[in-house]
Image (cartoon, grey):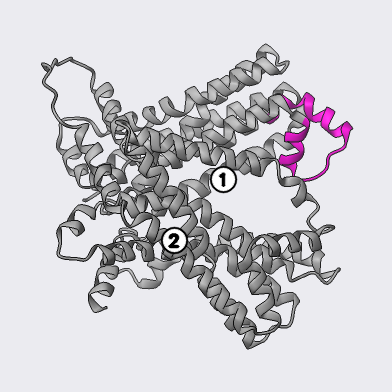
Amino acid sequence: MTKFFSLLKVMMSQDMNIFKIKSNANDSSIKKAILPLLLAALILFSIGTMYYGLAFELANINMTHVILSFAIAIPSLLALVEGIYKSQGILFEAKDSELLFSLPISKKAILLGRITKLYAFQLLYSLLFVLPGIAVYAMFEKTTAYFYIITTLVVLLFPIIPTSIGAILGFWIKKISVKFKSSKYVQLALTMAFFAIFMLMSFNSNDMMNNIVSNSDKINNSLINSYFPISAYQSLIKQFDLIILIELLALNIIAVFAFVMITKNSYFSVSSKSKEVSNNTSKKSNTPISYKSHSVIYALIKKEFNRYTSSMVYMFNTLFGLVLLIIATVALCTNFDNAITQMASSDISVEDIETLRVLAPKIFLALVIAMSFLTSITSSSISLEGKSFGILKCIPVKSSNVLLAKALLSNIITIPVILICNIIFFCFNNVSILDMILIIVASFIAPSISAVFGLIVNLKFPKMNASSDTEVVKQSTSSLVAVFGGMLLAGIFGIITFVLAGFGDYAMIIEDVLLFIILAVLWLILTHYGKRRFREIEV
């Protein structure tokens, strides 16, 4: 048991330093913890605000306990979604797998350690959604020590079932993908297809959420009847029942047991094949090698593209926003009334919909800008260099060219997708020539802002000692700052679109001008600060 905990400690130490920032040795622990605490507080406050607004209405009809159902249902659904692709990085693509497999460590201990690590990640993320719900419920209802004991037990247990199901789905996606030569692309296609279906289903299910207060009793009963942990939790906080508690524990044990039984015979072979497929692509062929002379920028972009396509986690996280843009574009073009109603999350009168239909180009422009800001490829590109960054600094290539290549690759990936969405929107809607030009201009500037901003953030908060791509892409400070910064910019431009809605084409011109000014300022910062910071980063 001591050896297992030592192994688990090593596994955890590689990925659990989520907000590890390079700092001076004399910095206090309080100073180092300020940023993660502020980010956590911001998330908790935002989610708690939404819970409070709902609880305030539910309290009037004595249905505050519905908050607890949502506090379990929402993170359970997110744990299922997260488990599908997070399991692929933690369980199958960890960089220390070859080392652990070669050591005299039982395979059972390695698999159990991986599962425990995945559970710990899921629990940490789930707490961001659970704790605000529990705190809001306690504000409206009188609670006892017994309530907090049962709640603590349920909070520790509820991520297990959705994580196990998500990991099983992730295992099958991985198992199918390794059978193909281009396994990364097959894995990405299968995962993105699943999430596209999930998003379409979610997009069409908002009608129930729009009437959550008036139908709270029905919704709560639906959640209780469809998901046993919610039913068990609601029953246990009212009155202790040993049988229900045993059933809840047994169900979680069965979920973990099912995952182990399904994956135990193939887990290590799938992990090994994943490594073999990536290694096979680097083997020399018997055909003669021909050398072609290319420019420095072309060579750097090609290097960036190869690094980008080598990581499924990297591709999935950066392409998800573009998939959402495609889905939203198709929805706006095929069913504008329903799409606008779903986006607004409320009923809209026929007159308002007709008014918004006239403003469709402005709405689409705001959508393009928002999705561009939420798609950040470069916020991880410096950190993903890892130990090879030292070599990159030594080669006779200007740092400005390296940064330019990273920004250009980001645009090469995002701009074509945005332009395709533009064409779809133009074909299905009556858009003037001027509006087309303004939307196309924004389709080039907004992704460029995201690319340059991501580089600046990653230069400021590099994470060069990460043990896996997952740690860089999903858990680094630069990724979080880029995401929240993108959300802030998207919100600002959404407000600008709303405020300037009555100014006609001048509104879109003003937005394009603002985008250009932001890009110019960020580019100046990158050219001056970026070169100096590039040389300062140590591996």
Quadrant (top left, top right, bottom left, bottom right) of the N terminus: bottom left
Q: Residue at x 18, y 44 (%)?
A: 390
* Residue 414 relative to residue 196: left or right: left
Which residue is tagged 1? 487
Q: Earlier in the sequence, mark 2 or mark 1?
A: 2
Q: Amino acid at mark 2?
A: Ala
Q: Which residues are magenta?
A: 337-363
* SS for dot 2: helix
| Image quadrant in which you'd find residue 47 | bottom right
- Tag of residue 258: 2
The front one of 166 and 137 is: 166
**Residue 167 visible in this rendered orientation of the protein:** yes
**Residue 477 visible in this rendered orientation of the protein:** no
Residue 120 at x, y = what percent? 42, 66
Residue 461 at x, y = what percent? 36, 51
Q: Residue at x 68, y 74 (%)?
A: 234
Residue 151 at x, y = what percent? 60, 77
* Residue 326 relative to residue 414: left or right: right
Q: Residue at x 28, y 21 (%)?
A: 298
- Tag of residue 7: none
Q: Amino acid at mark 1?
A: Met
* SS for dot 1: helix
Residue 481 at x, y = what percent? 46, 50
Residue farthest to the bottom, as pictured: 145
Q: Is residue 310 magenta?
A: no
Identify whether 223 is placed above or below 380: below
